[in-house]
Image: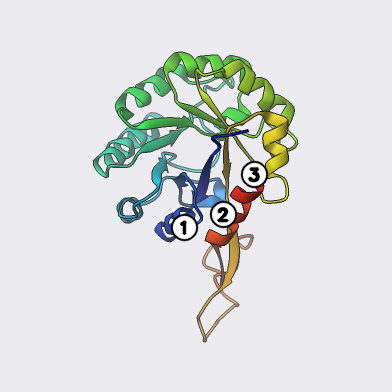
Amino acid sequence: MTNLSFEICVDSPEGVIAARDGRADRVELCDNLFEGGTTPSIGSIKMARRVGGIKLHVIIRPRGGDFLYSDVEFETMRMDIEAARTSRVDGVVIGLLTADGNIDKERTAELVTLARPMSVTFHRAFDVCRDPLAALEDLIEIGVDRVLTSGQKADAASGAETIKKLVAAAGDRIVVVACGAIDETNAAEVIASTDASELHFTAFEEQESAMEYRNESVAMGSADAPSEYVRRVTSAEKVQRVIEAANG
């Protein structure tokens, strides 16, 4: 496979720098990855936009949970897309479903029109839709540029058969981006088994806090959340290792 493209999911402007330094092509900037990613703050978007040498896509997702949005949430998404355009980002990442598990065509089309000339990716809401092949055709009809998928499985390796079918069905009408637990140990196999030309992955490594005084009896969030004194940060070296493995 030639002309591979690599997108890194990051949660900070510093992650954008690391992805660029690791020679990725593009980032998806998110907040709150513990819930699968929500819209980052306007400050994070503006700081990320200051980083040159890499394309910046921003997720537009007002909350965690499902992808069936209220009128208030949908209007929030519209406002966030307008703010992203004003901040000169290269693309936005959206995902909306109907209650019966199909693509919300009307609202998705409205957001795509609003987003232009930015690129538009449909995120992993796709992986919980009713019929992926029918959903793919809906997204093509609407004019979405990319769809992110693990083949409706927990990871790309498990969903490889479905991803391959989607890649074949898509042709050159939409880009199918493979994602889900991709790292240096399986990147080449995911490409070989799916025929995908684009990969989306995280490249986090744990970093100990520099705090000398610590009160570890108090948690700032859920008891299930990671410790405040250990952070996951995007590693340029890990980004490069995955890319090299994929190209190898």
* Residue 156 in view of the camera: no
Label 2 Cα crowd, 10 Å radius (few <14 / some 14-19 / many 20+): many
Q: Which mark is residue 246?
A: 3
Relative height, residue 182 to residue 178 (above, below) = below
Residue plotted at (46% across, 51% down): 31
Task: Pick whichever of labels 3 and 2 is earlier in the sequence.
Answer: 2
Q: Please, what is the three-letter code of the amino acid marked with disc 3?
A: Ala
At a point 34% along the width and 37% down the height, the residue shown is: 76
- What percent of the width, then of the height, locates residue 244? 62, 50
Query: For the residue labelled by badge 2, is the local secondary structure a helix, a strand or a loop?
Result: helix
Q: Position of residue 7 (x, y in %)?
A: 51, 43
The residue nearer to you, when weighing 102 against 17, is: 17
Instruction: Report the Cα–Cα distance between label 3 and label 2.
Output: 11 Å
Q: Could you tell me which secondary element the residue under label 1 belongs to?
A: helix
Residue 48, visible in the rendered structure: yes
Residue on which disc 1 sits: 21
Q: Front-most of 192 and 153?
A: 192
Q: Nearer the viewer, mark 3 or mark 2?
A: 3
Residue lying at 51% horizontally and 15% vertically, measured from the top left:
138
> How packed is label 3: few (under 14 Cα within 10 Å), some, or many (20 or more)?
many
Identify the secondary structure beneath mark 3.
helix
